[in-house]
Every structure is written in structure tokens, then in C-alpha cells.
């Protein structure tokens, strides 16, 4: 924890106790009633033992100080331990000097429950050894049970530390696993207690009966009879045959009282389901195991199919990448061939230019020769 947050927490505790008016015997300082040592941390490295004694001696006589220094360099590490002659002065120091600033740095002052003296200091006085071994705090008598009950009434509520999210998730998973194990054990015990029953029966789905089927069938029969006689039923016509009227009345009675019949059928179906469930519970362990194995096998097959699909996709991607690389190499080869052709054409052009230049030079040289020869001939004449 950050030391500044510790400083804030200690100050908040002190303010809460001051606002509630808590007794000294119930305060959080009472836990350190047997220790007169305090911890001081966060002060500048320039301070020495004398400076610390000057600051902290205003709340009591200091019996011992241990400024922690580096063994090699001898420089202070910025924290020390102080022992007062009276333990009550530690409470004053923690309440008043915790969170103050010394040369721009906030210091932390807190109690020390079990102080362990350093082992390196061999050259030590008898008094300091006795103080480090026995301590400096006065030994107080134990309080009675009545006072302890009163203290519990005025006790300050302490906030419980919040658990991490990861720990909460782990606890939830463990609880779920424990519940599943308990349910499996209970099912096994039930299976062991129940006597062996008859063989399992195969379930058959029963079709739902349509209540309006009788009504429509009666109407269709009446209409066919009228058609056979050559009559057509009107919108408000009634059947002439008394048997038809009786059938219609029976159909209406059935439609009215169909709900009761449906309820009785539902009850009979529920009874059958309960019987089937009782039969299944007897052999439920085997069925559960078979279902679990089937589910596990299905999940495994699905995972295998997914892995195969992933492998196929990867192979297809690799093939595509290889094809792309091949196309790129082919384009590079084509570009190189084009560059070569261009260079060859340039070389040919250069050769042609050279040949043309040579021919011109030859022509010019031949003209000069002819002119010289003409001049010579003219001079001779």
C-alpha cells in the first residue's frame, strides 16, 4: 500500500474516534498498549538522530532511537524507530505528528506492535539491551468483564477489505463445482436406496385432440345430407332432421364442457409423466452418465470439426500467399525482361548512331580528299 494512503487512513480513524467520543480503552491505540515503540518514515535523508529527537521529544521522553542507515555508505534510509519512556506519549505522537510536513515531505507515524532490535550492534549498553528485550511500556492490569462489554458497545466498526475480482470468480466456480458434486452424490444415494423397478418403457408422443373436430364433422355431415336431397342450407336455416338437431346439441354440450375433459386429460398425462420420471430416477444415474458422455462426445466432435476447419482455412491462406508470391515473382521477372529489352534497344540505337557517325565522317573525309585532289590538279594546270 502507498504510504500516503496509510497516512490518510490513520487520520480518518483518529477523526472518527474524536467525533464519536470513543474511550481510550476501546480505541485502536489500545492494541499497542504493551509497546512503546513507534515507526517514523518518509522524512528527508538529511535529518539526524538529534533532529528527530528534537521534533518528537515534545510529547515525551525518548528512551531509545534507531535510525536505519546503509551499512556501506552510512547514509540514512529515511525511516527510524523511537522508544518512549511512557506508552501514552506514543498515542500523542501518532495522533498529532502523523501527516505533518518536514522540509516539504509528509512523514508517517505509526505504532509498532512487536519491535525486533537489530542483531549487528554488539557494542551495546546493558540498559539499552534490557529496554530492547523487555520494552518500555508500563504493564497495566487486566480489565473486568463488565468493562469489556461496555467497550464492545462503543467499538468502532472496521471496514472489511474488499476482495479482488479474480478471487470472487474463483470462489463462485468452487461453489458451483461443490453444488454439482453434492447433487451427483444425492442422486447416487437415491439410486442405491430405490429398489429395482421394471424395465424402461419407450415414450410415445400423443397427438392433441381437437375439440372443434366433432363440431365441424357434424356440420359437414348435415350439409352433405341436404345436398343429397337437393336443398341448400340458408344463413339462419335449421336442420330438418331431429337426429341432426340432437347431434348439434350434443356438439354444443361437448364444446361447453370440453374444458373439464381437457383438464382430466392433462391430469392423466401428468400422472403418466410422474410415473415415467419415477422409472427414470431409478435408472437415472446410467441415463445421466450416458447423456453426459454423449454431450462430451458431441462437444469433442464439434471441437475436432472446428480444428479441421481452422486447419483448412490456414492451408488455404498459405496457398493463397504462395500464389501471390509466385505472381509477384513472375511480375518481377517480366519487369526484368522488359528492362533487358530496353537496354538492348538502347545499345542497338547507340550502335546505329555510331555507324551513322562513322559513315558521315567517311563521307566528309572523301569530300575533303576530292577537294584537295581538285585543288592540286588546278594548281598543276
Image (cartoon, grey):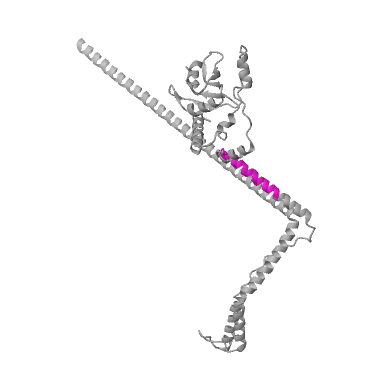
Please, is residue 18 above or below residue 293 in the view?
above
Residue 64 spot, x, y in % from top left: 56, 18
Q: Is residue 200 left or right of residue 76?
A: right
Query: Image quadrant of residue 118?
Result: top right
Picture quarter with the C terminus: top left
Query: Image quadrant of residue 268?
Result: bottom right
Query: Image quadrant of residue 210?
Result: bottom right
- Residue 261 visible: yes
Question: Is residue 47 on the magenta stretch?
Answer: no
Residue sitting at x 26%, y 18%: 367
Residue sitting at x 63%, y 14%: 126
Residue 140 spot, x, y in % from top left: 61, 28
Q: Nearer the viewer, residue 280 or 152?
A: 152
Q: Main secondary structure of the magenta part?
A: helix
Residue 208 spot, x, y in % from top left: 63, 69
Please, is residue 354 above or below residue 302 in the view?
above
Q: Nearer the viewer, residue 325 or 157?
A: 157
Q: Bounds of the magenta span?
A: 158-182
Residue 77 spot, x, y in % from top left: 52, 19
Amino acid at each position: 500500500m502507498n504510504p500516503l494512503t496509510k497516512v490518510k487512513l490513520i487520520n480518518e480513524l483518529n477523526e472518527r474516534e474524536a467525533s464519536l467520543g470513543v474511550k481510550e480503552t476501546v480505541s485502536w491505540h489500545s492494541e499497542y498498549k504493551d509497546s512503546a515503540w513507534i515507526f517514523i518514515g518518509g522524512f528527508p535523508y538529511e535529518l539526524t538522530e538529534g533532529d528527530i529527537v528534537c521534533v518528537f521529544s515534545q510529547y515525551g521522553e525518548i528512551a531509545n532511537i534507531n535510525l536505519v542507515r546503509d551499512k556501506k555508505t552510512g547514509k540514512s534510509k529515511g525511516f527510524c524507530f523511537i522508544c518512549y519512556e511512557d506508552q501514552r506519549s506514543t498515542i500523542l505522537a501518532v495522533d498529532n505528528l502523523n501527516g505533518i510536513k518536514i522540509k516539504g515531505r509528509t512523514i508517517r507515524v505509526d505504532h509498532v506492535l512487536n519491535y525486533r532490535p537489530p542483531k549487528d550492534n554488539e557494542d551495546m549498553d546493558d540498559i539499552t539491551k534490557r529496554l530492547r528485550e523487555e520494552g518500555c511500556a508500563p504493564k497495566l492490569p487486566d480489565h473486568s468483564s463488565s468493562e469489556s462489554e461496555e467497550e464492545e458497545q462503543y467499538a468502532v466498526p472496521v471496514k472489511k477489505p474488499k476482495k479482488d475480482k479474480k478471487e470472487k470468480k474463483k470462489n463462485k466456480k468452487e461453489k458451483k463445482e461443490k453444488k454439482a458434486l453434492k447433487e451427483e452424490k444425492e442422486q447416487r444415494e437415491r439410486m442405491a436406496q430405490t429398489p429395482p423397478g421394471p424395465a424402461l418403457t419407450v415414450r410415445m408422443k400423443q397427438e392433441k385432440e381437437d375439440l372443434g373436430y366433432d363440431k365441424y364433422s357434424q356440420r359437414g355431415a348435415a350439409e352433405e345430407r341436404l345436398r343429397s336431397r337437393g336443398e341448400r342450407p340458408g344463413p339462419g336455416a335449421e336442420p330438418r332432421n331431429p337426429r341432426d338437431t340432437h347431434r348439434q346439441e350434443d356438439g354444443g354440450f361437448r364444446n361447453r364442457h370440453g374444458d373439464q375433459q381437457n383438464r382430466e386429460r392433462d391430469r392423466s398425462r401428468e400422472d403418466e409423466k410422474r410415473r415415467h420420471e419415477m422409472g427414470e430416477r431409478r435408472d437415472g444415474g446410467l441415463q445421466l452418465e450416458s447423456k453426459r458422455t454423449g454431450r462430451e462426445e458431441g462437444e469433442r466432435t464439434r471441437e475436432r470439426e472446428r480444428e479441421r476447419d481452422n486447419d483448412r482455412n490456414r492451408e488455404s491462406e498459405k496457398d493463397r500467399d504462395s500464389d501471390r508470391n509466385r505472381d509477384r515473382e513472375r511480375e518481377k521477372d517480366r519487369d526484368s525482361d522488359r528492362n533487358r529489352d530496353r537496354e538492348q534497344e538502347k545499345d542497338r540505337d547507340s550502335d546505329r548512331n555510331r555507324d551513322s557517325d562513322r559513315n558521315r565522317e567517311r563521307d566528309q573525309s572523301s569530300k575533303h580528299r576530292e577537294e584537295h585532289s581538285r585543288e592540286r590538279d588546278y594548281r598543276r594546270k
